[in-house]
Image (cartoon, rainbow, N blue to C red):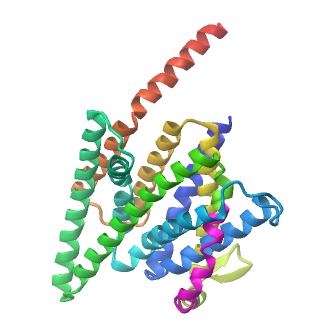
Amino acid sequence: MGELFGACNVLTGCMLNAAFLELLVKGDPGCGTLVTFAQFFCIAVVGFVFTMKFGTVRRYIPIKNYFTVVVLFFVANTCNNYAFYFNISMPLHMTFRSGSLITNMLMSVVMLKRKYSFSKYASVILISAGVLLCTLVTGQEVKSSAEAAGVEDSFFWWLLGIFVLVFALLLSSLLGIYQETLFRTYGKHPYEALFYTHALPLPVFLLFSSNIIDHLNIAMGSEPLNIMGFAKVPALLVYLFGNVATQYLCISSVYYLTTESSTLTVTLVLTLRKFLSLIISVWLFQNDFSLYHWLGTGMVFFGTVIFTELHKQIGIVASDDKKSDKKKK
């Protein structure tokens, strides 16, 4: 029951979060820093109250180790949100971030000297080809649109956005390896890590205060929505609140699910979430997505399934359920 509850919350929270983010980006493409700050601030406040009990709970992992985690986590999240400023579409953003297995494997081979089976390398090649296909097709579309509109530097900024996403992928993979080493040394304390990774970077946002205030003013001045017939609230402000609330539900549910089920089950749920979010993005928000995009996305999806051996895991679970039913009979 706990596993099903966690999986449902992950799918609900993360998919709604992606939808609210898309609404924000469509209304204000440069709102990435504001969104990141709002998420960090709210998650830190909730963590301080409920996880750290107003600072009365002892810390398990030394504070000095958290600073490395914070730098990697903060920069990676900021880059991911800021990429929208460079005309990166939501579907491409989702597909690109699904390529994290590529950088994770490369980092593990180089830094941890790990070795993988042939199927793992084959799946990574499939994922890489899928991400590359989606990127090239989107790049051609952006270049054609820029030439037609006479905006010569539009394609350059899009390429810069792709570089920002690649940089964020590398940082996220490095963060994963560092956290794995940290948890192996001090034990797993996910909610403590959740609090510190969001609380410690807050002073850094002072450097972006003018940007945050500017885009908060844009949100405050956006077209109002009629909330249940009682009050009119700026639309972007509503979307920002929805994004922050669903971000907390998403990330806390992922942590909860890791305590209730296997790593493969968590990966299955997250992979399914990305795929469903992509379908919603294309269908609900009418984003351009050609046959080549679907082909590339399918390669990424099936490559992920092969890499994590989810098909075997599902078969094992089904087999265990049958054995359990026979025993009951």
Q: Is residue 202 magenta?
A: yes
Q: Position of residue 225 (x, y in %)?
A: 61, 80
Q: Which residues are magenta?
A: 195-215
On the image, which quarter does residue 192 sit in?
A: bottom right
Decide if residue 96 is on the left or right side of residue 212.
Answer: left
On the image, which quarter does residue 153 sit in?
A: bottom left
Is 209 drawn above or below residue 189 in the view shown? below
Is 156 or 275 nearer to us in this picture?
156
Decide if residue 188 is on the left or right side of residue 171.
Answer: right
Q: Position of residue 86 (x, y in %)?
A: 34, 78
Is 238 drawn above or below residue 250 in the view shown? below
- What residue is rendered at 53% in x and 68% in y? 20
- What residue is rendered at 59% in x and 47% in y? 185
- What residue is rendered at 57% in x and 45% in y? 184
Q: How many badges with numbers are in the image?
A: 0
Residue 282 can be seen, yes or no: no
